[in-house]
Structures are given as C-alpha cells and as structure tokens.
Amino acid sequence: MGIYYENPCRIIGDQMYIPGGWTLKQTILDLRRALGSKPAEPVFLVTYHKVATVLIRKVMVEVAEKIGWRYSSTMVVAKDFPNKTDIFHVIHGTGSEDFFSSGKRGIRIIRDPRDVIVSGFLYHQRCSEKWCVNSDFSNPDHPFPQVPWPLNGVDLSIKEKYVNNLDGLSYQEKIRSLNRRDGLIFEMDGFAKITIDEMVSWKDRDSVLTIKMEDLISDFDGQFENIFRWFGLDDGDIASCLEIAISHDMNRMSHKQIASNPHISTGKLRKWEEYFTPEVSNAYEERFAGAHIKLGYE
C-alpha cells in the first residue's frame, strides 16, 4: 500500500501518492511524531481567499514538519478530517455544520471585508490561478476551473450566473477591462462575495478561536503564539515554531521581498480607505449591509 504525504511544493490541497513502501521523508516525519508532542485530537484552521491563506499554509507546513505533525488541506467543503492528519487547513472556509461543530479545536482568520474586496481587485489582475485566467466555458456543468473551487459543488444556476457575468472573458480579462470603480464593484459580485458571505454566515463556537488578519499582522509574534497555545503545544515547541513563523513575517521583509511576492499588494492595512469612493461605498452597502460591523470592524 502506498503512502500519502503533504507536498508543499505543489498546488495547495494536493497530496502526492507514493506507490510502494515508506519514503525517507515520511519515515523521518513519523519518527518525529512518535518522539514529539502529538495532539490529543486533530485541529483545524479556517482561512478564506485573500485572508492570510498563503501565510498560514507556509507556516503550518513547516511547523508540522518541525514537530512531526501531519498537515493536509482542502479547497472544497470540509466534511471530515482526512486519515493521518493532525492539522487540517480549510482553505476557503467552507465546511459542513457537523464538521465545524465537532468540538475539535480550530483557528479562524478573518479580514475587514472592504480590504478583501480591494485585495482581490488588485491580485486578480496579476495572478495566474487557473480559475482566474480560464476563458474556456464550453463544459455546460461549469466545473473548476470554469468557476473557483468554492463554487465547484454548488447549484448549476449559481455557476451560470457567475459565468454569465464574465461576458465570455476570463475573470482576469474582465477585471482588467474595467476602470477602478467598476473593477471594485465587479470584484464585489465575484470572488469577494464568496469570501464575505462565508465570513458573515459563520456561527461562533467555543472551540474555535477567531483572529483578525489585521491583528495577525500588527502583533505577529503574539498572535502566532496564541495559535500555537490554542493547539496545545508546549513552551519548547512554541519557541521553535515561532522561529519558523517569524521567517514569514511581512513586517520583517525587505521592500524587495514584498515586491516579489504576488500575494502581497502593498503590505498596508486599511487599503479600502484609499480605494472606496462614496460611490464604491454605496455599492458595498447595497450588497453587504455593514458586513464589516458584523465582523467586529468599525
């Protein structure tokens, strides 16, 4: 029987199947796990598109390897923990009620929805994600990459509405063809809507700690220590895991490093204040009716 293990060099959520016996890497990871501090039960992370997903993935992949835990992730609806998983990353925040209410400990990262819109508007003009650059909508069922992963399993009518809004263009071609005002409004009706709807519809649970992305950036060390403690790591493991996390801290990066990272637009918080004109703000309120207030923002 082959062995599945997480390969951080591939697309988020992919796992590589190795036919035959154990690989050297898997053997080392299992030895670390046997000698280290195994979690009493699996833990999970919830992030959303343009809400620290890449940061969390990079940190947790390295942390898992360091302490011998097993990391895996999904971009579709989470219904149960995969086998042999200690840290399960729900990439787009979509999961069943049974999964999120299982009582297992979790961390959820949220972001001011106005900045989700601005960040998506900027990122989708330059990214190379398959769904964003796809312009082939010939399959009438509209599976991924004709639609983003979160829409892959929804009703066909929702997919058709999404595709029709593109006017035969890729998402990227469409957003590039618009001026700033119209591009931001297009993003509100596009991927940002998926993210904001998921964040707002969340039901608070005592077993899940919610952290604002803004706090994660402004108090990087403190918030990552909170995450590691919530997951039950001891002081020794927390210290070594913080060293890993710090290496990914945007505040410690050079301007050159930030400029070369496609997932970072400017590194500034509250970018919406620069981009939201009264007209854009009105369009936001018409669609989301104070979603930022519901999430604890001003």
Image: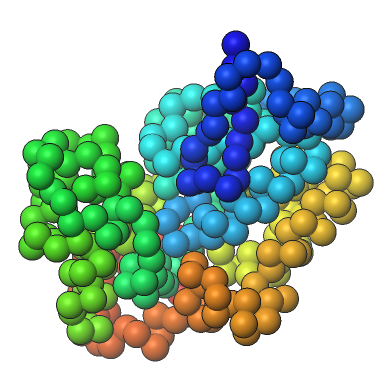
- Residue 290 visible (yes or no): yes
Residue 111, placed above or below residue 239: below
**Picture residue at 50% right of the left edge, 51% below the top:** 47
Image x and y of residue 160, in percent: 10, 47
Residue 186, placed above or below residue 16: below
Q: Quadrant of residue 154?
A: top left
Q: Quadrant of residue 245?
A: bottom right
Closer-to-camera residue (186/65): 65
- Residue 156 visible (yes or no): no
**Picture residue at 38% right of the left edge, 37% below the top:** 76
Q: Quadrant of residue 54?
A: bottom right
Q: Is residue 122 left or right of residue 1?
A: left
The figure's colour scheme reads rainbow
**Picture residue at 42% right of the left edge, 41% below the top:** 75
Residue 189, placed above or below residue 43: below
Q: Is residue 170 left or right of residue 51?
A: left
Number of marks in picture: 0
Q: Is residue 86 left or right of residue 29?
A: left
Residue 97, placed above or below residue 185: above
Image x and y of residue 265, in percent: 47, 77
Determine the residue located farthest toward the front in the rendered image: 20
Image x and y of residue 85, in percent: 63, 28
Closer-to-camera residue (62/81): 62
**Picture residue at 80% right of the left edge, 39% below the top:** 67
Q: Which quadrant of the rendered structure holds the N terminus?
A: top right
Q: Is residue 19 left or right of residue 220?
A: left
Image x and y of residue 177, in percent: 17, 77
